[in-house]
Amino acid sequence: MNHHNFGHGGFIGTRREFLQRSGMGMAGLALPTVASGALSPLTPKKSQYQGKAKAVIHLFMNGGPSQVDTFDPKPELTKYDGKKIPLELKTERPTGMAMKSPFGFKKYGESGLEVSDIFPKVGECADDLCVIRSMHADVPNHEPSLLLMNCGDSRLSRPSVGSWVTYGLGTENQNLPGFVSMCPGGYPISRTQNWQSGFLPAAYQGTYVDTKTTDPRKLIEHVQPKHIAKDRQREQLDFLRNLNEKHAEARDHDSELEARLQSFELAYRMQLEATDAFDVSLEPQSIRDLYGDNLQGRQMLISRRLIERGVRFVQVWHGAGQPWDNHDDLEQNHRKLAKECDQAIAALLTDLKQRGLLDETLVLWGGEFGRTPVVEMPKEGTNAGKINGRDHNHYGFTTWMAGGGVKGGHVHGATDDFGFAAVQDKVHVHDLHATMLHLLGFDHEELTYRYSGRDFRLTDVHGKVIESILA
């Protein structure tokens, strides 16, 4: 443990324990008070030890991509296609016979890592990928599994991974949020809980950005005033700050008052830098062509621009609904979804590597769980009476990481012969989180925050670092 005290009464202090839950847009941000000289909770801090990664980009494939159709090939499914597989399956809904993958797999790179033909460009980056084929979670339902993957607990209100990371490390750019969550078209299931700060100070919540909007001036709502000059705005903020500070002093520096007061300051400072960071038109045409002229290309390019500017944690969602939740028409939908992001993901990895940023940026790809290797039987409300999709599966699924201190061209763990359950070198979501914190320079058992009479951590009382994937 280093000289920073991550518990209650440490460098933040009781008088700066901000809002427990976040609001939307700029009004929910807790930011530093410049004139008062107060230390910002987002000031860069040293980790407990030297970590390989300095920032994280989390590519969230919302809804649960099928592991046996993406990064975990299963020849036995072809052999048993249309037949009962010799496994006892505990599934959420009635299922039928084995369903072979409609996609082929190809070996890529010097590592020979196998990738589905729906991800040909990501496959070209195979030697940078560390594929974990033995993930497992707790339940086969979206809401709790989203919260588990994003917050480390499937039921209770807990700080998100991005909030823990910015709490531990701060951020390198005080004119931008330390944690940004980009989700086009609205909120996912469980909404803002996926990037909440929970009981951590509100400065560490994620800032939501709807990347469906292409105008960089409109990506963050109300970041620029429409009817007031900037110098006049500064005068009003100074006047308002003085009033609020006097009010707060008489009330022992009420945390809600301080959070609101500080939110005005970052909103003011973000007016130029945020617009610039989100404006991909400032990139050379060759870079924009590399990523592709579509929504996912724009999101991935923005994520690189944010990391480049010192933002600590960027989450990139693929859809506000559950686009990867393919209970029917899996072949058509998975192919379409992969096509939307394949080029952009490969471009992100390539661009980070060319700029020397991949070694210090941890990129994580995956969803909240995987899908069954057998076909889901028709049931009202789930698959429109079709027999060509897969149900939820939390017993075994795949994620991959790249950069940030993990082995490239490496496969960890395995599911059974049919891809239903993790059976070798199993990795729970808590283990994934423990490993991420380790790569960032933290012992997951020591990065704690004292709340309600006990010390909390991201991994609760669980989790172990996956030593074998560390470079």
Image: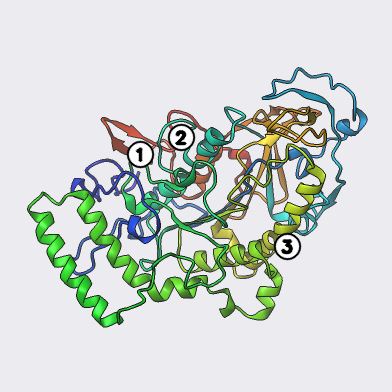
Q: In front of the other: label 3 or label 2?
A: 3
Q: Quadrant of the N terminus?
A: top left
Q: In this rendering, is residue 282 above or below 75?
A: below
Horizontal side of 459 relative to 353 (left or right) equals left
- Are dots 2 and 1 in contact, CB under 8 Å? no
- Near mark 2 (Cα within 10 A), the count class, few <14, some 14-19 or many ≥20, is many
Return the x and y of residue 163 as percentages of the image width and height: 41, 48
Query: Mark 3 falls on what kind of element?
Result: helix
Return the x and y of residue 235 as percentages of the image width and height: 20, 77
Query: Mark 1 falls on what kind of element?
Result: loop
Horizontal side of 63 relative to 143 (left or right) equals right
Query: Mark 2 falls on what kind of element?
Result: loop
Q: Earlier in the sequence, mark 1 or mark 3?
A: 3
Q: Earlier in the sequence, mark 2 or mark 1?
A: 1
The residue at 54%/59% (across/down) is: 360
Looking at numbered disc 3 in the image, what kind of residue is underneath it?
Answer: Gln
Return the x and y of residue 54 as percentages of the image width and height: 48, 57
Q: Which mark is residue 459?
A: 2
Residue 410 or residue 69, whichever sits in front = 69
Residue tagged 1: 448
Q: CA distance from mark 2 to mark 1?
A: 10 Å
Q: Which mark is residue 343?
A: 3
The residue at 84%/39% (across/down) is: 101
Q: In front of the other: label 1 or label 3?
A: 3
Looking at numbered disc 1 in the image, what kind of residue is underneath it?
Answer: Thr
By what rule are the colours in the image chosen?
A: rainbow
Furthest residue to the left?
Answer: 250
Horizontal side of 277 relative to 258 (left or right) equals right
Looking at numbered disc 2 in the image, what kind of residue is underneath it?
Answer: Thr
Q: CA distance from mark 1 to mark 3?
A: 38 Å
